[in-house]
Amino acid sequence: MRKLCFIAAILVSFVATNAANAQVRLSASLNINNQPGWGPTGYDHVDYYYIPDVDAYYDVNNHQYVYYDNNTWVHAQTLPSQYSSYDPYQSYKVVVNQPNPWEHNDVYKEKYKSYKGHHSKQEVIRESRDGRYKEHWKNDDDRH
């Protein structure tokens, strides 16, 4: 009987550990609450947005723009002053889930050039009533 209880305890421990690991993997793959209020809806995970209007990227996890300036890619909390009138709520954003997309900027720039100045309405997270974005309803943070 003791042996059976021991085996059952090991089995329960194994199942609990695997369930916890699966939950950690799932929460790591979702970053809905990290996405800015101006991000387009419909994505459980986003690494970067490519923004054709300014030919720049937004790094969702680090809350930074990545743009080309003076022959180098700059990572900064804000875009340079020449884009002070840029409104992320009104521009088209492309979801990019691959590392360092600026290293292939020529591909993104060419592929999405028709979206530059394209202000057809993408539903943004701030305006969505989808329950996945409820954290944005309580704390709409325009810093991003």
Image (spheres, rainbow, N blue to C red):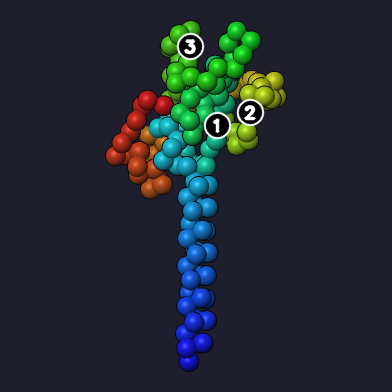
Residue placed most toward the observer, 42 or 62: 62
Against 4, residue 142 (above or below) is above
Report how far apart the C-alphas of labels 2 and 1 lie in the structure. 8 Å
Q: Secondary structure at mark 1?
A: strand
**Mark 2 or mark 1, which has the lower sequence index?**
1
Crowding at label 1, few (<14), some or many (≥20) Cα neighbours within 10 Å? many
In the rendered image of this protein, does residue 135 appear above or below residue 124?
below
Q: Secondary structure at mark 3?
A: loop
Which one is earlier in the sequence, the residue at label 2 or at label 3? 3
Q: Which residue is mark 1?
A: 48
Residue at point 48%, 92% (across, down): 1
The residue at 52%/58% (across/down) is: 22
Residue for badge 3: 80
Look at 55% across and 31% down and name the residue there.
Answer: 48
Kind of residue at badge 2 = Pro
| 138 left or right of 144 in image | left
Residue lying at 63% horizontally and 35% vertically, measured from the top left: 98
Q: Position of residue 126 (x, y in %)?
A: 38, 34
Amino acid type of the residue tagged 3 in the rendering: Pro
Q: Position of residue 138 (x, y in %)?
A: 29, 39
The answer to whether residue 1 shows anywhere in this view is yes
Query: What kind of residue is marked 1?
Result: Tyr
x and y percentages locating residue 12 in the rendered image: 48, 74
Marks 2/1 in contact by CB < 8 Å: the verdict is yes
Query: Who comes first in sequence, dot 3 or dot 1?
Result: 1
- Residue 83 in picture, x, y percent from top left: 47, 11
Q: Which residue is mark 2?
A: 101
Q: CA distance from mark 3 to mark 1?
A: 18 Å
